[in-house]
Amino acid sequence: MPCIRSPPTASLSGIVSHTPLRAHARPDRRRLCGLSASAVPDIANDAGVDIVAPKKVSMVSLGCPKNTVDGEVMLGDLFRSGFEIVNDHEDADAIVVNTCSFVEEAKTESLEAIMQAAQLKADGKAQRVIVTGCLAQRYSEDLAEQLPEADMVMGFQNYSSLPRHLKGMLGLFPELDPDTYSQQSRTQVGEATVSFRPEYDRHRLTPRHTAYLRVAEGCNHACTFCAIPGFRYAI
């Protein structure tokens, strides 16, 4: 994602106090993710019916390998639901920011990514910004209240419903007004501890020769610098 302008003093009270949103400070930690799906041909079929191109989704994936796997599973759900997964955020109809809140630096980085995605939306290069991941799970109400740029804040329990909600927000249900739908379903969080879903059928964000295998969730250590046990809970 190209560096974009952000307010000089933008911050989220209670999450990052008075910390300016900067340009990407450590781009090597951010995986600007997405795997290209086969585009629908821009032709009409023999019956004379136009083939409608699918809506495009990109993902900014932050944080640990567990978050990467969550992102891969979400992208797999979206692909199977008819979305095209793209790398270029400027070409996406919706941007999913899969956040991290491991330490303060991770929170700041996540907020920067959200604001940069929101700027692309303001510039007319994206229609919707979805916030998922640990920051969304931990600070859902604060994010929804203080970041109106985010169209949806979604926690772990509701990841499987992302395709349905995104279709509603992008106007793919003719009977629903997209903006009204977005406001009615803006915060979707739920429980932090959820049952495992099959993770083999996913859009990989790692190189072809390697993949993460989730063997556990949460953490049993109560390190003072880390918040994960507080919302991912114990193994």
Image (tube, rainbow, N blue to C red):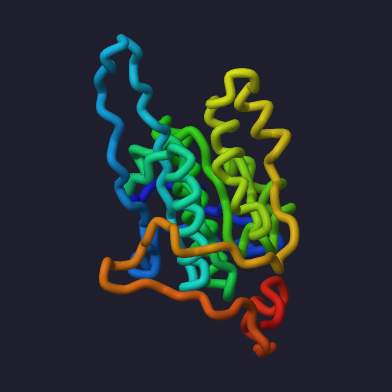
| 121 vs 16: above or below | above
State the residue at coordinates (71%, 65%): 192
Quarter containing the C terminus: bottom right
State the residue at coordinates (71%, 77%): 233
Q: Quadrant of residue 32?
A: bottom left
99 left or right of 230?
Answer: left
Asked if residue 2 shows in the view, the reply is no
Image location (x, y in percent) of residue 147: 63, 46
Front-lying residue, 230 or 212: 212
Image location (x, y in percent) of residue 111: 54, 57
Image location (x, y in percent) of residue 198: 54, 63
State the residue at coordinates (34%, 21%): 51
Image location (x, y in percent) of residue 213: 45, 75
Q: Quadrant of residue 185?
A: top right
Q: Quadrant of residue 60?
A: bottom left
Front-lying residue, 90 or 107: 90
Asked if residue 210 shows in the view, the reply is yes
